[in-house]
Image (cartoon, grey):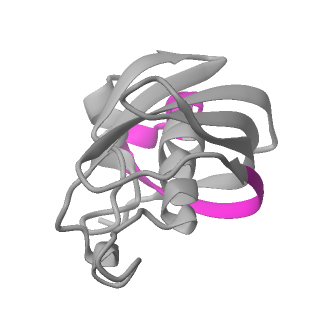
Amino acid sequence: MTDKEIIAKLPYQAPFLFVDAIEALSENGLTGSYTFKSDEYFYKGHFKNHPVTPGVILTECMAQIGLVSLGIYLLRNEHVLNSNIQVALTSHQIDFYLPVFPNEKVTVISEKEYFRFNKLKCKVKMFNRNDELVCRGVISGMLKVLQDEE
């Protein structure tokens, strides 16, 4: 399964898709990136005259790259190319260290802790363009393959 196929299978679309590329992929983890464009909808009100990417959006970006993209790859043997994926976030714990501003590219590194009974738990880290740690934590979720209706 290629990085483009994985991104195409993500159950998100603009303006709520926070994955541009997947740079590295294995059974044990994934590295991907996203650039927060200056016209993202959430910058208009967070914060007045000083836009900063909300922590909940950074968490979502880490979940889309580090959990869901990796989960799609791990489910590849279950005919995932011809199916839709349903995802339920079950838990997360994230610590934040640095802000992310408009037009900033971030890189997410995910390390699989376990994948059993379609529950995936990953350690995730986000770095900015200067390779500084922005945030890190643990995200868990359930993944389910849904057969497409014909």
Residue at point 75%, 50% (across, down):
140
Q: Establish if 56 lies above or below 65.
A: below
5 to the left or right of 112: left
Which portion, as a residue range, is magenta? 72-94
- Image quarter in which the N terminus is found: top left
The question of residue 44 being in magenta is answered with: no
Going 62% across and 34% down the picture, which residue do you hit? 125
Question: In the drawing, does residue 34 fall left or right of residue 86?
Answer: left
Q: Position of residue 88 (x, y in %)?
A: 66, 64
Residue 90 magenta: yes
Q: Is residue 68 above or below residue 75?
A: below
- The picture places residue 43, in percent across and down from the top left corner, at 31, 73
Which residue is located at x 52 percent, y 58 percent? 60
Residue 130 drawn above or below residue 84: above
Task: Identify the image quadrant of residue 137.
Answer: top right
The image quarter in which residue 44 lies: bottom left
At which x and y percent is residue 25? 48, 18
Q: Nearer the viewer, residue 88 or 110?
A: 110
